[in-house]
Structure formats: C-alpha cells, structure tokens
Amino acid sequence: MKPSTKAISTKPLPTPDLSDEQYLGAVCGLRPCRHGGLRVETEQLGSKKIIHNYGHGGCGVTISFGSAQLAADLVSKAAPKGDRIIVLGAGVVGLTTARELLHRGYQVIIYADKIAQDTTSSIAGALWLPVGIDFGDSPAKVQRMHDVLQRSQTVFRSLDPKLYGIEDLSIYEPKISSTEPDLFDTGIIAKPIKIDSFPFECAAEPGRVFKTLFIHNNRFLSAIHKDVIELGAEIRQRKFASIDELADLNESVMVNCLALGSRALFGDKQVYAARGVLVHMKPQDLGYGIHDGFKYLFPREDALILGGCFHEYDWDDKPDQEMIDEILNHHRRFFGQF
Ligand SMILES: Cc1cc2nc3c(=O)[nH]c(=O)nc-3n(C[C@H](O)[C@H](O)[C@H](O)COP(=O)(O)OP(=O)(O)OC[C@H]3O[C@@H](n4cnc5c(N)ncnc54)[C@H](O)[C@@H]3O)c2cc1C
C-alpha cells in the first residue's frame, strides 16, 4: 500500500476568510486516551469473553479500521462464523468493528448509549494522522501500531471517496511546529517536502507540506452507519451502568468499543480524557489544510474547522469563550488577519 504520490500543487491558493461574519459556533469533545496506548486484547469475565478495542486517543478515525481488524481477529479465535457477537459502542470504533465482523460472516448486535453522529467521533476533524496517542515504547508495540495504521489506510483507500467523504489533502505546516519526523518513517505517509514560502497569504514562517487523507467525518460516519444496518446489524440504544448488566445478555462474546466508558465500566484507570475545542466557520473550499500542532485548520465540507487544544485530564465537554477566542486569534495571526 503506497502513500499518495500525486504532485503537490505550487499554484496560488485562497486564504481563508476568518472574519466574525464567517463564525458558525464551537464544539468540544473528549479524546479517549489511555496510558499504555491502544488496548486490543481478550479478557474472560465470568462466562463472557470481552474483546477490548479502546484507547484511540486523538486518532481514532485514523486507526479505526486497523484496530477493528485486530479485534475481529480475536473474535475469530473466540467464536465460529455465524455466531451472534455484541459490539458495545457506536462511535467510529464500534461501527467499523461491527462492519468488519459482518463482512467476516458474524451476526452483530450493537449496544450504545449514543449512536454515530451523537458520539465524540462526530466531532473529530478528521485528519488521517497518528497523533495524540501513546504508541508505547517497546519495539513490539511500535510495530503493532504500524501494522494497525497500514491495515487501516488500506481500507480507507479501498472505499469510494465520494460516498465515504475521503480525499487526499495537502497539509501545510509552519516551521515552528514541523515536528514528529517519525510519523513519516514507515512510508505510510509520503515524506514531507520543505517549502520556502506558503502558496497563500500567511504571517508564519514556512516549514513543509505533505499529503495525507482527510475524512469528511459527517459523511463518513453516516456511510458506515448505513453499511452496518444494510449488512444486517441490529442497533439497540442502551446505557450500561455497571458490568453486571452485561452478564444478563445472552451472547457470550462481546467487543468493547466504549472508549472513555471503559474507565467506569471495566475499571481501567489508565483511561483519561484529552479535551478538544473546535471552532466552526462557514465552509470554504480552500483545497488544503494547516497542521500547526493542535492549532489546525481543515476545510470540511460542512464547516471550516479551526482547532483547537489537547488538554489532558480535563473532562469538561463544553466549549468555553476563552478557548474560542484563543483559537480565533491564533488563526487570524497565522494568516496575518489581525
Ligand atoms: C476535538 C477532537 C478532534 C479530533 N480530531 C481527530 C482527527 O483529526 N483524526 C482522528 O483520527 N481522530 C480525531 N479525534 C479522535 C477521535 O474522535 C476519537 O479517537 C474517536 O472518536 C474514538 O472513537 P470511539 O468510537 O472509540 O469513541 P466514541 O465516539 O466516544 O464512542 C464511544 C461509544 O461508546 C458508548 N458508550 C460509552 N459508555 C457507555 C456506556 N456506559 N453504556 C453504553 N454506551 C456507552 C457511547 O455512547 C458511544 O456510542 C478527535 C477528537 C476530538 C475530540
């Protein structure tokens, strides 16, 4: 699976309009982080086999299909094809896991408090970039994460880009935040190119540009939600207050895609939130994105997304005016509009 080699355009590109008239509102979401990183493993709890699939942090959309495949590999060891499997959670991780299991010939019932567009997953940008996650430092863990990324990107690139809202996007970075060189080491994302100037009006010092996938998240979530229903999944809305409630369900194999919910339900104290606020401006067809740490800008079809922040251990899920002003001021300064 090769990264995109489509040429990066050098022609002038539009500068976003960040005036007050463009402001639509702000949203806030809690990234489901975990010390020790992604947890995909089987745990026997009484008569139930629980296959965990959580800890996706700031890149759950990016790695969703890859971790879904890992979880489905574990399901294959626990139950024969045709069995009915429970998927707990209906964010991007629950839906992609359910989709993978259905494709492998299982029956699926999804239980979730909130579904698709009502979950944290719908808040994500979403840029295809493995950031905001603890990869782990052992060579085995790093290798596993690279496998997950590779498998995930292969699925993303196999989907109809129009139907699922996926495109290759040029991402520009200022020099000051051109970090994380190892993101490109495996070749899953093509190496960035150094630039001497930005092809749009900008007050920041130019750094580099690279291409990666951008996912128009509303369209993407609707499409995979539709997929699982068409493939025969049943979705039941239910909030679980304790693990004992799982014991009452008939099925013996369950995949846990409860994200932050895994902390309370399964007692995993390594799970924590990283708060993110995003400002929505009226949609603008820029044809590129900016990645400046968590102060990014993405031209999503339903809104121009201005990020943001990554506040670890902050469980406040409402946007605040101070952060909204900080985000707007940052981007206006970046584009010399202050
Ligand atoms: C501001 C922001 C920007 C982001 N940007 C990006 C990006 O650019 N690229 C990227 O790849 N990722 C990004 N992410 C990260 C991504 O959104 C998450 O990693 C991803 O959504 C996690 O998906 P999930 O399905 O595990 O969790 P969720 O979407 O939170 O879904 C969890 C599910 O579990 C259910 N649940 C939980 N507890 C219970 C319970 N007790 N009973 C019943 N149901 C329960 C919920 O109702 C829900 O259905 C961003 C996140 C934020 C907040």
Image: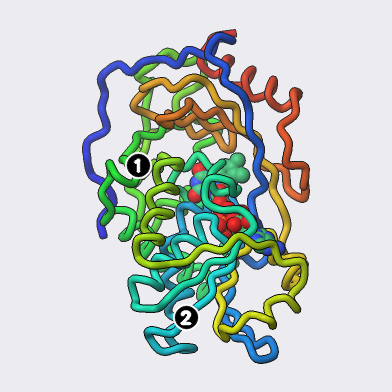
Task: Classify 278 as above or below 126.
Answer: above
| Relative image position of residue 318 (x, y in whole percent) | 73, 36
Q: Nearer the viewer, residue 15 or 187?
A: 15
Of the 4 image quadrants, the one containing the C terminus is top right
**Residue 106 picture quarter:** bottom left
User: Image check: 123 left or right of 2?
Assistant: right
Q: The residue under label 2 is which amino acid type?
A: Arg
What is the count of numbered marks? 2
| Relative image position of residue 3 (x, y in whole percent) | 28, 51
Of the 4 image quadrants, the one containing the N terminus is bottom left
Q: Which residue is mark 2?
A: 84
Determine if residue 38 is in view. Answer: no
Q: Nearer the viewer, residue 304 or 47?
A: 47
Tell me which label, 2 or 1, sits earlier in the chain. Answer: 2
Q: How is the image coloured?
A: rainbow
Q: Are marks 2 and 1 in contact (CB under 8 Å)?
A: no
Q: How far is mark 2 from mark 1, CA to CA?
A: 30 Å
Q: Nearer the viewer, mark 2 or mark 1?
A: 2
Q: Residue furthest left?
A: 6
| Relative image position of residue 163 (x, y in whole percent) | 29, 45
Task: Classify 247 as above or below 305.
Answer: below
Q: The residue under label 1 is which amino acid type?
A: Gly
Determine if residue 111 is in view. Answer: yes
* Secondary structure at numbered mark 2: strand
**Residue occupying image coordinates x 44% and y 48%:** 221
| Relative image position of residue 252 (x, y in whole percent) | 57, 86
**Residue occupying image coordinates x 60% and y 27%:** 279
Q: Which residue is mark 1?
A: 165
**Residue 287 picture quarter:** top left
